[in-house]
Amino acid sequence: MAATRAPQARRGGARRRTARAGLLFVLPWLLSLLLFTTYPVLTTLYLSFTDYNIIQPPRWVGWQNYRTMFTADPAFWTSVENSAYYALLAVPLGLAGALGLALLLHTRVQGMGIYRTLIALPVLVPPVASTIVFIAMFDPDNGLINALLQTVGLPIVGWLTDPTWAKPALILLSLWGLGASALIFLAGLQEIPRSLLDAAAIDGAGVWQRFRHVTLPLLTPVILFNLVMGVISSFHIFTQALVVGGTTGKPLESTLMFMVHIYRTAFRYFAMGQAAALAVVLFLAVLVVTLVIFRSANIWVYYEGSRGSNR
Amino acid sequence: MSLKNQSGCWHTLDRRAFLRWLGWGGGTACLAACGTASTPASKGQKVIVNFWTPGGGGDFCLGLDAIARDFEQHYPNIAIAETQCGTGDQEFNEVLLARIAAGNPPDAAVLWTSPAALAARGALLPLDALMQQARYAQAENWPPAVLASCRFAGKTYGLPVTAGSCGLWYNRDMFEHKGIPAGRDDFPRSWDELRRLSQEFTVWKGDTLEVAGFIPWHAVEDLAIWSALNGSQLYDAVQRKYTIDAEPNVAMMEYAVDWLNQEYKGDFARVTRSGNWEGYEVEGRQPAFIDQRQAMFLTYSWNMGLPIFAQSASTWNMARLPVGPGGTKSVAGYWPNWLALPKGSRHVEQAFAWLDYMSGVGVQTWFRNVPDLPANLKVPRDLLPTALVDGKGKAFAQDIMQFFRDQLDSVTPMWDSPVQDFATDQLRRALEQIMHKVATPRNALAEAQKACQGALDKVLIAAGP
Amino acid sequence: MTHRDRTQSHHRGSRTGARRAGRSRLRCCLAPLMRHVLLGMVAIAFLVPFYWMAISALKDNSQIFARPLQWWPHPIRWDNILRALHYPSFPFLRFLWNSVFYAGGVSIGTVLSCAAVGYGFARLHFPGRDLLFAITVSTMLIPGIVIFIPTFVLFKHLGLLGTYAPLICPAFLGNAFFIFLLRQFFLGLPQELSDAARVDGAGEFRIFWQIMLPLVRPALLVTALLSFIWTWHEFFGPLIYLSERSQYPLSLGLFAFRAQHTTEWSLLMAASTLATLPLVVLFFCTQRSFLEGITLTGIKG
């Protein structure tokens, strides 16, 4: 047990020492921020107020990009809707799915290594091949998914050719990548001391109670991580949306995600200033959501390491 | 509890040692990474030209290297560095623009984006002076309508090295099976005739389209062609105005919707779900014509060199495109690859010599790997795609290639707008809305018109007079 | 068995106890079977894309998208593998080595730097710590496609274009994703450990290296593994920074199978399967280490 009554000078000295050590520990990252983040971010912020086509010097236009975005660009609102729809469905499904997978993979079963590898496979396959394989699986008249639906007696669905079903197809696609978040949950589950679970079992707690009162609270730091990362990555979905929907979010702009809109504005329409403005808006929107999540974390996240105080 | 219990299998390392390790490790990795710099080929006094393409695959890129070696025989002072082949997608623009912005672009490049659009933003160098001294690439050696895609504000910024023309493909077996005359000259000359013929073939089985005759224009790349066939156009390069919502264009789309309603149950989604009705593979989805499920569609010349056509089981032929109610003569479209010099190119004359050579000579080797139709008039006209000769015989291959060459003489201007890609996206959106009955042709085209003209005006203002 | 079952079985007579014992033996055999079935179903659902890719590698081009779906290649074209390995502009071993170098370098750098930085954020209080952490998380909100051009220009001025330096060196300075991850894990460790160590007179670094770091081993392994896998798939960075085909990693090299109008599907699938196998082996070997749980002894009491 740490001494509770250290003299004032020693405590101050200790604090200075840890502060100095802390700064040294994060020094590499500070360097990275200065070199690789500050300049590009400030440039992007500046460019959002300009008309810039990457080739010629930027021309100051003030708030025009933002005004156009909100009033004269119907694609902006479409992509916001699409991204919000996708995020609202993909994040909870992904989180619950990854947690379920991790729990499943955490039990002691013969040949668990093989099961884990099989479930992680979609993450290991190169995107060049995997997106095409996924798209082939969603083929309306030829693909696996519809074949499965037919065997169960359900009507076939147009999937990527149908505006109503294209986004759900994208969401299902994202679920195949659950292996990565499941892996992180798995690491978190490994951190939970066996002794605690055993003690709870001896006290008479059942499987569900052990989960609810021991596992889940100790997992909350990892849940927070996966939740925040899930939100960020769902708003940033790009490659799959681009391959599935092209630069117009076909069919009928249903797969036009916000990042695709930024991308095509910058590199297809050569309007980098407008794209920078879109990027700033995306940043602010996701920042707000992330802040809300972190604030709420004070209530539901439990850190073993800072008993009583959170964050 | 003391530290000793916790050392486990970790050696005692103090902070300095760790930092030393990290420093050495990181430094070594970084040095190794820096050391992976490409060793510039020792070419003595030669000028090294960097050449990029957006994509092309293994065979094609090696083929370009072979052309480069031939070129170097003719021009001993110039060396072409190994061709950089991109990923074949939009990323090429990102890389090219980043390079131009950083000041070290390739000296020459193939473009899949319209030079008019890049030129309007100052990304390319004008070639008129260089073209005058050229061996193959002089202005008069290109079909005027094709060269128009490279011009902006009176100057030329690219060379349309290949330009695949198009025609109407039809399945002779299916025609003969129905007792319909299947010669090229028997083919429908007007939209009404085409429509009547299409009805002979279309078969619905419940909710699924089993066989399709001809599906009216829904692909954005072909829209300018159908507009021209109806006596109108989408973009007027001379006036620098968009005419998307002109009456003939509205009529053209209303015709298509009417056709859809009559023959295809008015449900384009059902049509799409029933099969891939394009003339090429889409995302791994095999085209329906392979299984004799489609009688006619519009397709481009490079397809003739692909096994899917050349070695198909069915007998087929190409015909000229039928004319709409508002049109007077049959026209064709084209889809080019361009060559250009990016702004910041270091060795302009040498790079242009390479482009010139490519236009007249290199493109023949190019054609052997990828059957893109050479556009330059100085290229001999006896090139034949190997796959087609093997699959359907030399005589037929000659006939088809002659057909496509002739089509190139009557192409309508395309790809010549400074906001080409933006317009393509807007038109694709409008087409989808029309085909899926989300908007009427008039409204959808009007919306596209407004957006495109607005974007065009912005660019023209910024580009100056 | 639930708590109630266990207590109730104590109160019943021996006859029902025997019957209960028989039933519980059956249940005990059933439970692992059920688990296998469930795992099997889930595993199959995840396996399908890879399986499809692998068998497509052994099919003819025309058969890959034929209908009805072919679940087993007829005939099996083993020569596709050789053809893929000898495909023009696709020196497989060269690309493989580049990928290993690239992914390995990034992975090592990421683990080292993110462990240190994550620890700093979690366990060491310094002025501005929380603000800096908020900024760290915020950097992940910035769309990379917009800011890559200024970064690219920066590297151009440093003269590092055409090398792997812009791709590997920044990894040694940290990565926001893994910093966040490791910070969360470090926060989950009990405060008493470091307090006790401090009382014993250990320096901060020693606490980090000898006590804290071993305790987050699963997270370190996940970091190493995920950063390796993601770097293995990364192609845009190599695309803009490398200049010679011989430098390409596998992720970029695979595009040799995509031509302008066609794609060599079976060869692409073959090459992609070959490009995946090293990752599968790596994953299978490392995931075993996740089995080891952490026992924190001698803390309570």
Image (spheres, rainbow, N blue to C red):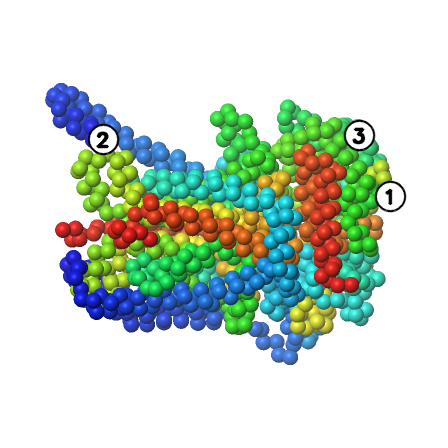
C-beta proximity under 8 Å, tags 3 and 2: no
Q: Secondary structure at mark 1?
A: loop
Q: Position of residue C194 (x, y in %)?
A: 23, 59
Badge 3 or badge 1: first in the primary sequence: 3
Name which quarter of the figure residue B325 lies in: top right
For the residues marked 3 and 2, what is the alpha-carbon distance in whole angstroms?
Answer: 74 Å
Mark 2 residue type: Met
Q: Residue at x 36, y 47 (%)?
A: A297
Q: Which mark is residue C1?
A: 2
Tag 1 residue: B329
Q: Is residue A190 left or right of residue B185?
A: left
Task: Indicate the quadrant containing the N terminus of chain A: top left, top right, bottom left or bottom right.
Answer: bottom left
- Name the residue that disc number 3 marks: B196
Total labels: the figure holds 3
Q: Circle 3 marks a residue in which chain? A: B
Tell me whether marks 1 and 2 sit on the same chain: no
Q: Residue at x 49, y 43 (%)?
A: A87
Percent position (x, y) of residue A308?
Answer: 26, 50
Q: Which residue shows up at 37% across the image and 58% down it?
A: C130
Q: Secondary structure at mark 3?
A: helix
Nearer to us: label 3 or label 2: 2
Tag 1: amino acid: Lys
